[in-house]
Image (cartoon, rainbow, N blue to C red):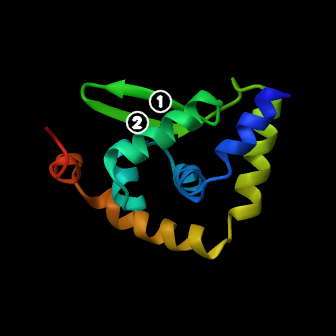
């Protein structure tokens, strides 16, 4: 039961759901998600870690870049079912459509350019 409760808690935050919906367009770098969500890097990083911990997203690191994608068939059935229903239910939501449009602009930017404002 705890796994399902944690899964639903993860989906209880608009920013996390927006990030999930953005990933329907394909794998994204953390810096692209930061730009899209217009939140602090640490906040977006925590959101993505939460989504990863409950199995909704997968992360890979390439050098200093962190890339996220939606969980695939390797996820437990419960996670996959909840993810599929969420993506289906929000596919035509106005916020999702607005983010999808904005994501086109974000993805046209160079990753170095996107991350320049928060690199240490």
In the image: residue 35, left or right of residue 119: right
Q: Residues within 10 Å of mark 1 (few under 14, many from 20)?
A: some
Give the percent coordinates (x, y) of residue 85. Answer: 79, 51
Asked if residue 43 is positioned above or below residue 72 in the image, the reply reads below
Query: Which residue shows up at 56% across the image and 31% down it?
Result: 52
Asked if residue 41 is positioned above or below residue 37 in the image, the reply reads above
Query: Which residue shows up at 78% across the image and 43% down it?
Result: 82
- The residue that disc 2 covers is 67
Q: Quadrant of residue 63?
A: top left
**Which disc is residue 70 wearing?**
none
Give the percent coordinates (x, y) of residue 22. Answer: 52, 55
Spot the residue most to the right. 1
Give the percent coordinates (x, y) of residue 45. Answer: 41, 40
Asked if residue 27 is positioned above or below residue 91 in the image, the reply reads above
**Which disc is residue 59 wearing?**
1
Q: Secondary structure at mark 2?
A: strand
Asked if residue 49 is positioned above or below residue 84 in the image, the reply reads above
Quadrant of the snapshot with the N terminus: top right
Count the numbered circles shown: 2
Q: Nearer the viewer, residue 90 or 11?
A: 11
In the image: residue 56, left or right of residue 89: left
Mark 1 and mark 2 lie on one chain; the one further toward the N terminus is 1
Q: Nearer the viewer, residue 114 or 16?
A: 16
- CB within 8 Å, label 1 to label 2: yes
Q: Quadrant of residue 8?
A: top right
- The answer for how far apart the CA atoms under marks 1 and 2 are is 6 Å
Q: Secondary structure at mark 1?
A: strand
Q: Residues within 10 Å of mark 2 (few under 14, many from 20)?
A: some
Query: Which residue shows up at 33% across the image and 58% down it?
Result: 35
């Amino acid at each position: 039961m705890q796994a399902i409760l944690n899964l639903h808690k993860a989906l209880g935050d608009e920013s996390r759901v927006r990030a999930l919906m953005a990933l329907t367009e394909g794998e994204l770098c953390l810096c692209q998600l930061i730009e899209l969500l217009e939140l602090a890097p640490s906040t977006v990083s925590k959101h993505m870690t939460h989504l990863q911990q409950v199995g909704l997203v997968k992360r890979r690191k390439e050098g200093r870049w962190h890339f996220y994608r939606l969980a695939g068939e390797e996820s437990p059935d419960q996670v996959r079912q909840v993810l599929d229903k969420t993506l289906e239910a929000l596919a035509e939501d106005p916020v999702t459509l607005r983010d999808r449009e904005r994501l086109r602009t974000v993805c046209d930017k160079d990753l170095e350019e996107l991350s320049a404002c928060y690199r240490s």
